[in-house]
Amino acid sequence: MRSGTLFRALVLLALLVFPFVANDFWVQQIGGRTLGLGTVALSLVFLAAHGGMLSLGQMALAGVAGYAVAYFTAPVAGVGLLLPLPAALAIALGLATFTGLLIGLIAVRTSGIYTLMLTLAIAMGFYYLALQNYALFNGFTGFTQVDAPDIAGVSFAEPRAFYWLCIGAALGCYGLVTYLATTPFGLAMQAARDNPRRLSALGYHVASLRVAAFGVAGLIAGIGGVLGLWLNGSISPGSIALVPTIDVLMAAVLGGLGHPVGAYVGALLFVIVQNFAIDFIDRERFNTLIGLIFLGVVLFSPDGVIGLVRHVRALFAPRSEKSGPAIDAVAGPDPANDKT
Amino acid sequence: MIDLLAGFNGRLFLTVTLNGLTLAALYFIVASGFSLIFGLMRVVNMAHGSLYLLGGYVGYEVSVLSGSWLLALVAGAGAAALAGALLQKGIFGWMQGQDLRQTLAAIGVSIVLADLMLAQWGGTAYQLDLPAIFRSFVPLPVVNRYPMPRLMLIGLAVLIGIGLWAMLNRTRLGLLIRAGVDDRRMLEALGVDVPKVFLGVFAIGAGLAGLAGVIGGSVLSISPGEDARYLLSSLIVVIVGGMGSLSGAAIGALLVALAETYGLAYTPTYGVVYTFVIMVAVLAVRPQGLMGRPA
C-alpha cells in the first residue's frame, strides 16, 4: 500500500510540474483535452465500475451542459440569453444532472447490453434534435464563438490557466467518485451491481440507487462538457454525434472500466494517438488506427491498460493482488448468483 | 375545427404516409437482420450499419461495371454476408457468451470499416441506377402519381418478411435457429454444430443489411454517415419491437418510420422527438419490447 501512495504522489507531482516544463500545445491540446475527455469518460467509468451499467449517453450529457453554457453566455444569431457566468454554470450543471436522472429513469428498466443500446439511442436522438432544432440549439452551426471566461482578471483562454482549471475540475470529480465509493450510497451501488435481488431483499430500492448514480454521472459528464466547450470555443451537433460518443467509450475501455483512474489513462492514450497519428499513418486514417488499437485492447486485455499494468504487477508481486471487476462484471449481475 | 379540416391536406398526408411506409420497408430489412443476429447469438452487432454501407458501395461498383442492377443486388448482399461471416469466424466466434465484449469489438470493427470505406469511396453520395422498367411513376388516386421504386421497395420488404418467416418456420435451419434462441446449450447437447449455425445466421443477417444497402442506395442514396443512421434505426426498431422477433421488427419498423416521417413533415424541428417518445413509452410499459419475450 505504501508503494501505491508513493506512486499517487508522484503522479500528482507530475501533473503539477507538467505545465511548467511543457509548451503551450502540450499543456492545452494534450493536457487540457485529456482532462476534459477524461472527465466525461470518468462519468462512464463511474457507472460501469461501481454500478455495473454501461452508458453511451455521457457525451450527450456533456453536450447538454456545453450547449447550456453556450446558450447563456454566448448567444448567436438571436439564439440564447445572456446571463452572468455563475448562473449559466449552475443552470448548465443542474440541467446535466437532471438529464442524467431522466436517462437513468429510462435506463434502469434495462440491463447489460440493453442499457448500452438504449443510452446510445437516446444520445443519437439528442444529436438529431440538436441538428434539426434552431430555436434552442441553432441547428447545424451550433454556437461558434464561445470564449473561455475571464474570472478576476485571469483569462482561462490562456493555456496554463485553462490547464489549472481542468486539473481542479478533474481532481474534484475524481475525488468525488472515489469518495462516493466509500459512502453508504456508493457501497449500496456496488451491492446493486453484484446482486440486485439480495440488495432489494435487504430493503434497498435498487432502481432509485441506479437513477441517483446516473444523476451523479450526469453532473460529472456536464463538468467535462463545459471544459470541452471552452477548449474548442464552440459546440455543434458534431460535438455530440456518434463518433465523439464512441470516443468516450473508447477512452474508458482503453484505460480500463474497472477503476476510475482508467478514464484519464485512456483519455491520455486516446488524445496522444489522435494528435500523433499523423506521424505513424496518414492523418485522415486516424480512426482506423484508434479503431484497431481499441479492437486489440478488447480482444487481448479486456481490462484495458490498467488491467495490463495490474497483470504485469501481479507477475512480479510476491502474492497475487485481488483484481478489480473484470469487464464482464459490467454486463450485469451473474445470473448464477441471482438464484438466491 | 372547420379551419383545421380545411387546412388538412389529404394529398400531402397520403404522400407522407407512403414515404413513411417506404422508410419502414427499408428499416424492416435492415433491422430484421440485426434482430435475427441478436436473437440467436446475443451479439449487438454495432457493425450492422457498416455492413449496410458496404453492401451499398459494392452494389454501386458492380452496377457501374456490369450495368445490371440484379447483379449489383446479389453482389452487395453477398459481400456483406461474406464480411459478416468473416467477423463471426474471426472475432465474435471466439468470445461467445461474453456479450459485452462482443459488442465492444463490434464497435471497434465499425469504426475501422467506416474509416476504410471513407478512404475508398470518399465523402460523396452515390446512387445506383435502377432498371428502366422501375424508373417510372405509378398513377394513384389522391396523390396523382408515386415513384415506382418506392412502391417496389414496400413490396420487396413484404417478400423478404414472408421469406424470412418461411425460413424460420418451415426449414431445418429455421428449426435450429428457433431451438437455439430458446435454449442454446440444449441444442449443443443434442449434437448440433452450433458454431456453424451461428455462422450461417450471421451471414444471413449481414446479407440482409447489404441487400438493404443496395436497395437504399437505389431508392435513396448512399454516403458516409448512413451507417450510423441505419444502426440507430435498427437499435430503436428492435428496442420497440422486441429483440429477436420478426413480427416485432416489422411492427417496430412501421412505428418508428411513420413517427419519423410524420414528425418531419408536420413539425420539422422536433421530428425525431416522436420516435423517442414511442421508445420511452414502450420501455415504460413493456421493457422487453412489444413482441419480445421477457429475458
Image (spheres, helix red, strand yellow):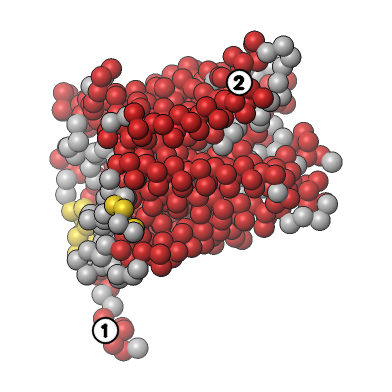
Measured as percent of width and height from the top left, residue B163 is found at: 46, 37
**Above or below A305: residue A96:** below
Q: Observer-nearest residue: B111 or A11?
A: A11
The image quarter in which residue A77 lies: bottom left
Q: Could you tell me the amino acid type at mark 2?
A: Arg
Q: Could you tell me the amino acid type at mark 1?
A: Ala
Q: Are marks 2 and 1 on the same chain?
A: no
Q: Dot 2 corresponds to which residue?
A: A310
Q: Residue at x 74, y 36 (%)?
A: A335
Q: Secondary structure at mark 1?
A: helix
**Above or below A3: residue B258:** below
Location of the N terminus of chain A (image quadrant): top right
Q: Dot 1 corresponds to which residue?
A: B6
The image quarter in which residue B127 lies: top left
Question: Do the numbered discs 2 and 1 sit on residues whose CB atoms are within 8 Å?
Answer: no
Is residue B22 visible in this depiction of the protein?
no
